[in-house]
């Protein structure tokens, strides 16, 4: 039997361990790695080439939406399945626009998670029942059609998304430069460009917007710089 290889990406260790135990009880699943943030998930997918990446959204350093975008650009054969605690509209549509093959909630049963992994591996899409209902209620459209809508932040480049999150998490320009391996002046340019694109001109505004579109969670302790 050819097993489906899976990477788990979530910043909560206990959840990753629980998922691994559940998934590996299935004969056709094999968990090949665990990532604790989006940046590590991108690196591990490049290294391990799993069939499916099971991805949380609100993770430090790089959120699951941007991580999904980067993964699918580099390794399009890997299917990304979002497993989130949140069913906010911004989270769902952001994930779909990034190219995720499906979205389900963490409170879904192990059976539903297993079914979702098998379906996306077979080239299908999968939406948990609560997620599908929410999209229909808010849009009156199918999940696929809803994913085509382009809000103002869709014009951000991949690097601008990274800088956006790190600013919202309270990092100063020097810290962002060190994290991304770029110069401080380059960070300043990215900050200027994303503020222009979003029509937001202060850090507090960027932070509020980041929470609103699901880049970070409102529970994150933030320091405005």
Image (cartoon, rainbow, N blue to C red):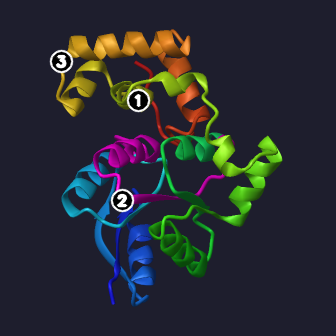
Q: Is residue 67 magenta?
A: yes
Tell me: 149 left or right of 99. right
The residue wearing badge 3 is 183
Q: Which mark is residue 161?
A: 1
Q: Tell me the SS state at disc 3.
A: loop
Which numbered disc, 2 or 3, marks the residue closer to the eye?
Answer: 2
Tell me: 119 left or right of 145. left
Q: Tell me the SS state at disc 1.
A: helix
* Label 3 environment density (alpha carbons within 10 Å; few <14, some 14–19, many ≥20): few
| Distance from the alpha carbon under mark 1 to that under mark 3 | 17 Å
Asked if the residue at tag 1 contacts the one at tag 2, i.e. Cβ–Cβ closer than 8 Å, the answer is: no
Which numbered disc, 2 or 1, marks the residue closer to the eye?
Answer: 2
Q: Quadrant of the N terminus?
A: bottom left
* Residue at the spot 55% in from the left edge and 70% down from the top edge: 116
Judging depth in this view, the residue of 183 and 26 nearest the camera is 26
Tell me: 7 left or right of 179. right
């Amino acid at each position: 039997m050819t097993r489906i290889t899976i990477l788990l990406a979530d910043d909560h260790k206990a959840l990753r361990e629980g998922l691994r135990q559940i998934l590996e009880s299935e004969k056709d699943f094999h968990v090949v790695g665990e990532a604790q943030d989006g940046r590590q998930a991108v690196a591990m997918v490049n290294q391990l080439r799993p069939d499916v990446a099971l991805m949380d959204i609100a993770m430090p350093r790089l959120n699951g939406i941007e991580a999904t975008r980067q993964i699918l650009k580099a390794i399009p054969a890997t299917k990304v399945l979002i497993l989130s605690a949140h069913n906010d509209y911004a989270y769902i549509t952001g994930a779909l626009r990034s190219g995720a093959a499906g979205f389900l909630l963490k409170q879904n049963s192990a059976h539903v998670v297993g079914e979702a992994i098998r379906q996306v591996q077979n080239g299908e899409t999968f939406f948990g029942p609560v997620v599908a209902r929410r999209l229909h209620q808010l849009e009156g459209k199918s999940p696929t059609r809803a994913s085509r809508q382009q809000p103002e932040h869709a014009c951000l480049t991949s690097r601008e998304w990274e800088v956006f999150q790190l600013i919202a998490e309270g990092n100063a320009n020097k810290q962002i430069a060190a994290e991304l391996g770029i110069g401080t002046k380059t960070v300043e340019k990215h900050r200027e460009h994303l503020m222009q694109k979003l029509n937001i001109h202060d850090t507090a505004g960027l932070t509020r917007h980041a929470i609103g579109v699901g880049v970070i969670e409102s529970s994150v302790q933030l320091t405005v710089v």
